[in-house]
Image: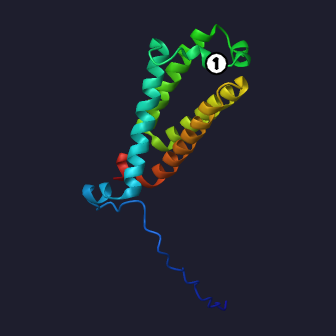
Amino acid sequence: MASINVPHAKVPQTNVPRMAAAPSATVSTQLSNPAYQAFTLLRVGFTVAPILFGLDKFLDWLVDWRIYLAPEINDLIPGNAHQAMLVIGVIEILAGIVVAIRPKFGGYLVAAWLAGIIVNLLLQADFYDIALRDFGLLIGALALARLATAFDHPAAAR
């Protein structure tokens, strides 16, 4: 058989910096990376906020959370609005824990949860401002999930 000599395509060099630190990178090198700093801020924020908001569903210190449940949603679920908020509180606490442990999956989980909250708020026609804020949070949760692909590596790979 005759062999065909095909020249290899040359890969163009780009000026895009590598986001993931090399395994031998020092902690201070990684901490000085702005993208890693953004990942860490988002990870901490999307861990703490859902846990605190979830806990407040049991305490109602910040607000009476039942006012945010659309009547159409309340009619679909079993129980009353207070019971729904207790279940929602548990889900939010679990979502915060998932972000802490597995930020890539947790970021997508929180983004999906926020999408559901946005739909619920839009059904009421009174909370457009909060729906818009939650859309911004949804974008932040997606950014966390994407950054986690570069910075969150299982302990076995380290």
Asked which colour scheme the image uses, the reply is rainbow
Q: Is residue 16 visible?
A: yes
**Residue 49 place in picture, x, y as percent:** 44, 31
Is residue 119 placed above or below 103 in the rendered structure? above
- Closer to the camera in the image, 9 or 145: 145
| Residue at the image position 29 percent from the left and 61 percent from the top | 25
**Residue 143 place in picture, x, y as percent:** 52, 48
- Closer to the camera in the image, 72 or 105: 72
Under mark 1, the amino acid is Leu
| Residue at the image position 41 percent from the left and 36 percent from the top | 100
Q: Is residue 153 visible?
A: no
**Residue 42 place in picture, x, y as percent:** 44, 43
Is residue 4 placed above or below 24 in the rendered structure? below
Q: Residue 88 sits in which quadrant?
A: top right
- Closer to the camera in the image, 30 or 121: 121
Q: Seen in the image, is 129 located left or right of residue 101?
A: right
Q: Residue furthest top?
A: 79
| Residue at the image position 31 percent from the left and 58 percent from the top | 32
Q: Which residue is mark 1?
A: 69
Q: Residue 116 sits in which quadrant?
A: top right
| Residue at the image position 47 percent from the left and 74 percent from the top | 15
SS assignment at label 1:
loop
Picture quarter with the N terminus: bottom right
Q: Seen in the image, is 29 located left or right of residue 73?
A: left
Dot 1, crowdedness within 10 Å: few (<14), some or many (≥20)? Answer: some
Is residue 157 placed above or below 97 in the rendered structure? below
Is residue 106 placed above or below 146 in the rendered structure? above
Q: Say how many tags the image has.
A: 1
**Residue 141 place in picture, x, y as percent:** 52, 42
